[in-house]
Amino acid sequence: MLRAVTFVILATFSATVAAAEPHPVVTYSKMGKFEDVRDDLKAAIEGKGLVVDYHSFVNRMLERTGKDVGSAKKLYLDAQSFVFCSATLSRKMMEADPANVAMCPFSMVVYATTQEPGKIHVAYRRRWRPDGSAASKAALAEVDGLLDSLAREAVGMK
């Protein structure tokens, strides 16, 4: 009986905490040309002295593999991602908690959907852990701040 009550309390608490947290994906949008926003995102990343380690062509992969997985639905006009890291912020978050290595590298996407071809989106995943220490949470918040500033810059919201 005690186990059941404890489980219900913990499940309720977990659901409440999860509901209180912001959406894990942050997206900013603007009307424009895909190539311009993509180039602005890359320039924003490089402008902070960061190096893009990998440039992924997500839309090409989806188009190439669609028939293999039984779906030829075209979702995007284009979708690309940039993968990069910050030596300073990565070290700070990993020194705060070695498990934060799972939060690296950083990834940001730029995409245009077939439904709204002129609306270009820039998005990233928040770095957040409910179990983190104060130092870990502060370091992850700093990473989120960087990613947010890069996304805003790419869509002209400096």
Image (cartoon, rainbow, N blue to C red):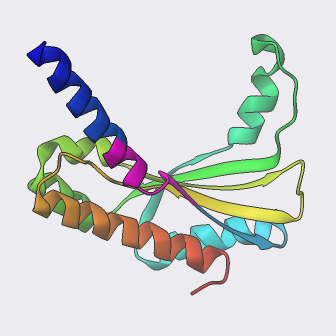
Task: Describe residue 132's horizontal placement relative to residue 64 as left or right.
Answer: left
Q: Quadrant of residue 141?
A: bottom left
Q: How many marks?
A: 0
Task: Describe residue 107's horizontal placement relative to residue 37 as left or right.
Answer: left
Picture layout, residue 155 above or below residue 131: below
Q: In the depicted view, which residue is nearer to us: 36 or 24?
A: 24
Name the residue rendered at 19%, 16% in the picture.
4
The stretch drawn in magenta includes residue 83 = no
Picture layout, residue 5 above or below residue 53: above
Percent coordinates x, y for residue 90 in the rendering: 25, 58
Name the residue rendered at 45%, 67% in the picture.
147
Direction front: furthest residue = 1
Where the C terminus falls, by quadrant? Answer: bottom right
Picture layout, residue 88 above or below residue 61: below
Task: Describe residue 19's horizontal placement relative to residue 96 as left or right.
Answer: right
Q: Which residues are magenta?
A: 16-26
Name the residue rendered at 69%, 64% in the picture.
38
The stretch drawn in magenta includes residue 22 = yes
Q: Quadrant of residue 84?
A: bottom left
Picture layout, residue 6 above or below residue 20: above
Q: Quadrant of residue 31?
A: bottom right
Q: In the depicted view, which residue is nearer to us: 109 or 47?
A: 109
Name the residue rendered at 60%, 50% in the picture.
81
Where the N terminus falls, by quadrant? Answer: top left
The answer to whether any part of residue 46 appears in the image is no
Percent coordinates x, y for residue 48 in the rendering: 42, 77
Percent coordinates x, y for residue 65 in the rendering: 76, 21
